[in-house]
Amino acid sequence: MFSHLDENQLTLDAAAALDFRARSSNKAFLFCIFCCVHGCFITSTKVMRPSLCLRSSLEMRSLAPVERNNGDSEMAEKLKGERSTLSSANAFLKAQKALLAAENNFLKSEALKIKAVNKELKTVNDALKEKNSKLSMNNTELANAFVNLANKITKISRSSEWAHESSKWAQGKLK
């Protein structure tokens, strides 16, 4: 990443941190070191091949033992503490992730239940619409039947009046 520094420009703390990290883990990791000379962050993604301000990890390893002082054990303890803190935070985040996954599964099951209830309600609603339509048709037929009955009653009453009048007329003629 930053190839503008040579190994002599790294601070003792940075060299000690690199050496500690390289020895303490054989897994690939990403770490950052602040370059005090240039004010930039130096990163590495592999244990043995850091893309740092160093020319190679072998040069860094050959320099680190010569430049070490009593601060190395303090740095190692500090890094162990940070690692412990990060490990605890990681465990907490994993637990949170598990809780969120469980809640997500619960919400998915609730969503499926709601979909099933909605489907049942739609079926009931469709059946009610069909019955309402039939009742509406029955009401129309009933109204038509009442109109026809009223028309027949009117006709009968008219014919009845006519029959009554004609019977009066016939009785008047017979007298």
Image (cartoon, helix red, strand yellow):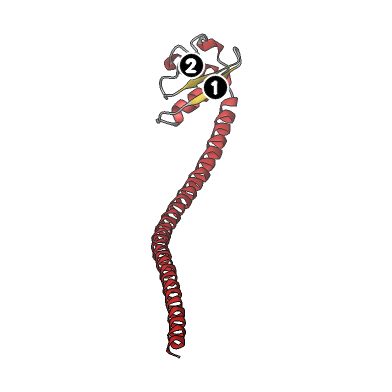
Helix, strand or loop at mark 1: strand
CA gap, disc 1 to disc 2? 9 Å
Across and down, in percent, residue 98 comes to: 46, 48
Mark on residue 149? none
Q: Is residue 129 above or below residue 91?
A: below
Crowding at dot 1, Cα within 10 Å, few <14 / some 14-19 / many 20+, comes out as some
Residue 45 place in picture, x, y as percent: 44, 24
Residue 89 placement, left or right of 123: right
Does label 1 or label 2 sit earlier along the sequence?
1
Looking at the rendered structure, the kind of residue marked 1 is Ile
Quadrant of residue 68 within the rendered picture: top right
Q: Disc 1 marks which residue?
A: 33
Answer few, some or many: residues within 10 Å of disc 2's Cα (few below 14, many 20 plus, some between 14 and 19). many
What's the amino acid at mark 2? Leu
Q: Residue at x 51, y 47 (%)?
A: 96
Q: Quadrant of the C terminus?
A: bottom left
Under circle 2, the secondary element is: loop
**In this picture, is 85 found above or below 151?**
above
Residue 145, by quadrant, is: bottom left
Check the image and report above or below for 100 versus 68. below
Camera-side residue: 23 or 49?
49
How many numbered marks appear? 2
Q: Residue at x 54, y 22 (%)?
A: 33
Q: Where does residue 3 sit, x and y in percent of width and height?
A: 48, 10
Specify the farthest residue to the bottom.
175
Q: Are marks 1 and 2 in contact (CB under 8 Å)?
A: yes
Q: Nearer the viewer, residue 161 or 107?
A: 161
Q: In terms of depth relative to the viewer, which is nearer, 148 or 123?
A: 148
The part of the image, by quadrant, that contains residue 73 is: top right
Q: Which mark is residue 52?
A: 2
